[in-house]
Amino acid sequence: MAEHARAVVIGGGIVGTSVAYHLTRLGWREVVLLERKSLTCGTTWHAAGLIGRLRGSRTMATLVRYSAELYARLEAETGVSTNWRECGSLYVTNRPERLTQFRRAAALGAYVDIEAQVVSPAAVGRRWPLARVDDAVGGMWIPGDGRVIPADVTQALAAGARAGGAKIREDAPVRAVLVRDGAVVGVRTDAGEIAADVVVNCAGLWARELGLQNGVTIPLYACEHFYAVTRPMAGVTPDLPVLRDLDRRVYIREEVGGILIGGFERAAKPWPAADGNGGAGAIPPDFAFGQLKDDWDHFEPLMRGGVERIPALADAEIQILLNGPESFTPDGGYILGEAPGLHGYFIAAGFNSGGIANAGGAGKVLAEWIVGGHMPIDLWSIDPRRFAPLHNTTAFLTERMTEVVGLHYRMAWPNRQPESGRGLLRSPLYGRLAARGAVFGAKMGWERAHFFAPDEREPALRYTFGRPDWLPRVAREHRAAREACAIFDQSSFSKLMVTGPDAQRELSRLAAGDVAAPAGRAVYTPMLNERGGYESDLTISRLAPDRYLLVTGTAQRVRDADWIGRNVRPGSRLAVADVTDEYATLTLAGPRARDVLARATKADLGNAAFPYGEVREIEVAGARAWALRIGYAGELGWELYVRSDAAPAVYDALTARGDVTDAGYYALDALRLEKGYRAWGNELTPDDTPLEAGLGFAVKMDKPGGFIGREALLAQRARGLTRRLLLFALEEVEGDGVMAWGEEPIYRDDRCVGILTSAGFGHTVGRVLGMGYVPVATGETTEQLLAARWSVDVAGRHVPARAAVRAWHDPAGERLRA
């Protein structure tokens, strides 16, 4: 065994070999891959090998597109065949709603350069003559998709890695990842220790268990996963495309003259089953190339669905029912990136039965992250920091796994919420809001009110691609914030308390805004990376000379704490404490917010005594509260941070007269769209700078000592912008009912130039609104940009749009400062 490696990759499936291969392609030679048994022996060997490039987001589609390109050329490079076959993908549906989903997907394909066509039932029948299409309403054809033999791809990647200098060791289980002073230093194997600067956990089924040894959260769990293979059948030829009937939850492809049929059942079976005491059963220590017990009863609904689509399957002879474990994550996205709080520990695991399609692109960007020292593109949707330890319990995972497998082929509704594993975190106001008809959604474990339906016996969120039935309810909440007073429970806000003699010095370096303001000021500011891109978008309130409250998004709880911890200079005298659960957050917004708050406090709320952007400690309904005069609704208002145990009494006092309207996050999102307020993870990502986002006012370029990202912003300003964020209002025909949700392509004239990062209905302006980045030509003025002919592709229909750079509502911000 080598004594030292620059990087140790743990796991010899397709993902591990891809990471090793791409590290060597970037010039790293001291790479060691360790496999506990034999290459491909975990999950890779029994994968179906489907490469469907069109995914639900532009990032994921881009990564799978690269995988397809890589697998097609690997044989020429390495001499090892991947058995790549560009047979195409064919989707079929008998549901009109699914056809809308296909149209949305095909529209996204135009933006990410993946050809996709919505086709008629007859066209489906021509490409798959054995398929029944008399019940179909249409389909989708993606000609560039294909299939591979997963074991062959893995061997080709391994050959390429070896050619680049990597060493691959089989029968070399890793017993421990060695850590010192918050960083990995190597691994321990049965043959000895290997010192390493970087360790990559690609251990698949074993990734979670390995992570737990070092306190690393890798919330994945295996489920039994099935497919059946028939003996050769008449009419089945190798050139048939992969057929997917998402309504029946099945995929079908040719296999040695027969048919391979698999799918994603509605209720999956976690494996190993829980041990009865709340813990997980153990994976057998010698599990390799293993199959699980047949379960024809469990597979029967998928087989029945296959027969309904391919009637000839009814008479086919089944050769094998393969049941092998596949690892899934709580949200159906895989886990890729550096573990929070542990330098040099990277993860590539939990591929949700999509490891073959994703491995090429995932290995590439992770290798670039490792070598370059930063995320190469926006990968927030698969970042390990989107999870918290509460997502990693066996009880939660085994409950969620029963649902998450089936989500692969369920309708991709906007705002779709999980049904299982709910209630991990609840605001102290949860009971009161539920009694008032709140319809809750889940984010980062929190139950959050989306909207209120007090007149419904069992309020529920009903999904659609069009205008939803809850829109009038949200409009009522929206109007209250614009015309009277609305109250929002935002207790899920992530809250970090930073204290110590060096708090100002370090936060001034991390934040691009001026946090050296006097105590009592709240500063809206970005935290940027060295490239000037957003790492966070937050509010920093200076409570005292050596005490700051950082308030950031619900989903950024782990991420922001990790970013601060990684970038604070060694030896700095400060402490960072997560106080999210200690403080509830109540937000009042609207022209009457001052009057409502005055009923519960003796503090002077006048504009002179308490101007916009100030923070004060006041007493509200007998409780001490930090009151920030700020808000995401774009109206006069305050955010109140009170101890969680005092929150119910404060809420009761504020709402006692019945003239304050409960409002949820759907209304808040609509309000912020009218104000053009950007959202982190949508408009603000590591790829986007404040200058491009139109938020240069939140950056203080000339502050003493500078800040991370300053040089990149100065250089960008000197060069001139090549892209800008625009606001869009769709110009629909009266009564047309068009609706956009985000990820719809933006067209300038007849050319696709961008995509909506956010979208929704603005109830004050009476339009569907969105935002998105578009390219800017050298020397092009704002006036020329706005005067162009713009449209948005909504499910295949180009809807004219008006562009702007200023807010649609109160662009001068006068109402905030009233």
Image (cartoon, grey):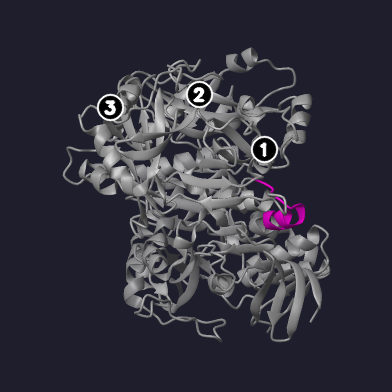
Q: Which mark is residue 599?
A: 3
Q: Residue at x 22, y 40 (%)?
A: 436
> In the rendered view, would you say 136 is above or below 201?
above
**492 displayed left or right of 16:** left
Whole-angstrom CA distance, mark 2 to mark 1, is: 34 Å
Secondary structure at badge 1 equals: helix
Quarter of the figure with residue 528: top right
> In the rendered view, would you say 661 is above or below 527?
above
Q: Residue at x 33, y 50 (%)?
A: 134
For marks 2 and 1 on the same chain, the one whose residue lies earlier in the sequence:
1
For marks 3 and 2 on the same chain, the one whose residue lies earlier in the sequence:
3
Residue 615: x percent and y percent? 48, 31
- Which tag is nearer the camera, tag 2 or tag 1? 1
**717 displayed left or right of 761:** right
Residue ID for mark 2: 728
Residue ID for mark 1: 508
Q: Which residues are magenta?
A: 365-377
Circle 3 Cα neighbour tier, 10 Å, few/some/many (<14 / 14–19 / ≥20): some
Whole-angstrom CA distance, mark 3 to mark 1, is: 37 Å
Residue 438: x percent and y percent? 26, 42
